[in-house]
Image (cartoon, helix red, strand yellow):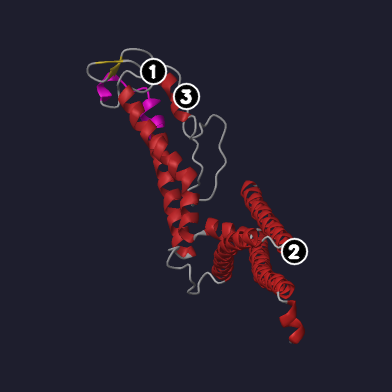
Amino acid sequence: MENQDKIQTALDNMRLALVIIAAVMLLLAFIGFVLSIFGLQCLVYTLVIVGWILVTGTFILCGVFLLLHNVVADTCVAMDQWVRHPTAHTALDDILPCVDNATAKETLDRTRLVTYQLINLVDTAITTVSNGNFPPQARPLYFNQSGPLMPILCNPFNSDLSDRMCQPGELGLNNATEVWKNYTCQITTPEMCATTGRVTPKFYNQMAAAVNISYGLYRYGPFLADLQDCDFVRSAFTEIHNDHCPGLWKYTLWIYVGLVLVSAAVMLSLVFWVIYARERRHRVYTKDFNAQHPHDVREK
């Protein structure tokens, strides 16, 4: 919606600029016509010079908007062809190196598998080591862990990589590290808990690293898969083609045609000014000549 508002604002500004340019040039044509009627040739010729400069600038704008119109049309057609025929070779294939759906799905499955295995590894370490009550002879599994049992992570996937619902008491990937801080003990040398806790700081840091990796894969894996098969690009192109391309194509054409018509009208006005000014000057010269040489006129 925000992008659509920006595009609509740009189109409104373009139309406003066209109206202003047309009004200025039509006012210039009217002033030139009035000056021609009153025979103010010096001002007429000055206005002609200014008019030609404006006409030249307007024709340049016509070329710019014609180029913009063609670019918009070609881009919209290319986007539509790419969306409608994703497997065909189109103009956007070299710009958007997308992979096939099977490869994207394989990537997504691999990210799910790594997430599942990492969380399983962390949960196994919690249930067998951190929450285990080993005798001192069982080192390195024993490090004087004590206190309430640590909650395990919620694995979002089953063994077949299908989605799994979290069970009561399981921690989400987004807040597990904060909760586990409460189960971290202070240590002595060697790595032995000197206070109540289920994990040492070193063990906690390793678990937190595994959680961060799992969370990143779980959250951004689908997005990365969409990047590979360009699903998000396809959705964006469809929205642009359906919502913005018709308006851009129509309004750029209107502006181009409007500038051409205004430029042509003012150019013709400039030619008529010069012709009218010369004709008026010729009539004045003839009238003065006849007044000064009436005898020659009668003889003719």
Tell us which disc is closer to us: 2 or 3: 2
Magenta region, main secondary structure: helix
Magenta highlight on residue 195: no
Compare residues 242 and 33 and report the one nearer the observer: 33
In what element is the residue under mark 3? helix
Identify the residue position indicated by label 1 in the image: 197
Whole-percent x, y for residue 127 in the image: 41, 31
- Residue ID at (71%, 76%): 293
Above or below for 109 versus 287 = above
Residues rendered magenta in the picture? 125-139
Disc 1 residue crowd, few under 14, some 14–19, many 20+, Cα 10 Å: many
Compared across the picture, whether 20 is left or right of 119 comes to right
| Mark linked to residue 179 | 3
Q: Pick out the residue farthest to the front.
A: 295
Residue beneath disc 2:
37
| Number of residues whose C-alpha sits closer than 10 Å to that of mark 3, classed few (under 14), some (14–19) or many (20 or more) | few
Mark 3 / mark 1, whichever is N-terminal: 3
Q: Is residue 291 left or right of residue 181?
A: right
Q: Amino acid at mark 3?
A: Val
Element on which disc 1 rests: loop
